[in-house]
Image: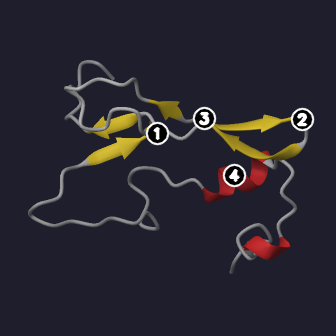
Amino acid sequence: MKTQTESISMNQIDLIFNKDLILSRLRTFGSPKRLVMSHDFFLNAAVLILIVPHKKKPYDLILIKRTNRKSDKHSGEMSFPGGESQKIRSEIR
């Protein structure tokens, strides 16, 4: 049975910041509801998305504009912080 929050469609959502709605949509790394795609040519990667409430308006996302550098193939692009993932050493946790 779906909770009230799970059954809300996008056109029904009041776009004022709703912490409970955001938390209900997040998935843990091991969640069976998490979308997982694989292919021999795929690299495991991740992005960090920061959602910020600002003056009671719809969610703001923090983006980064990369500096202009000849050696950077993504130079000058807007991006999310993130990149290729690495194995976590268990002693760090």
Q: CA distance from mark 4 to mark 2?
A: 17 Å
The residue that label 1 is drawn on is: 80
Q: Amino acid at mark 4?
A: Ile
Disc marking residue 22? 4
- Which of these two is toward me, 65 or 92? 65
Q: Residue at x 17, y 58 (%)?
A: 42
Characterize the local packing of mark 3: few (<14), some (14-19) or many (20 or more) Cα atoms within 10 angstroms: few
* Mark earlier in primary sequence (3, 4): 4
Seen in the picture, residue 30 relative to 7 is either above or below; the reply is above
Q: Residue at x 29, y 46 (%)?
A: 45
* Mark earlier in primary sequence (2, 1): 2
Disc marking residue 62? 3
Q: Residue furthest right?
A: 56
Q: CA distance from mark 1 to mark 4?
A: 18 Å
Q: CA distance from mark 2 to mark 3?
A: 15 Å
Task: Determine the secondary structure under disc 4.
Answer: helix
Cβ atoms at labels 2 and 1 below 8 Å apart: no
Seen in the picture, residue 7 relative to 73 is either above or below; the reply is below
* Mark earlier in primary sequence (4, 2): 4
* Mark earlier in primary sequence (1, 4): 4
Characterize the local packing of mark 1: few (<14), some (14-19) or many (20 or more) Cα atoms within 10 angstroms: some
Q: Is residue 76 left or right of residue 49?
A: left
Q: CA distance from mark 3 to mark 4?
A: 16 Å
* Mark earlier in primary sequence (2, 3): 2
The residue that label 2 is drawn on is: 55
Place of residue 3 in the rendered image (x, y in percent of width and height, measured from the top left): 74, 71
Q: Amino acid at mark 3?
A: Ile
Place of residue 8 in the rendered image (x, y in percent of width and height, measured from the top left): 77, 73
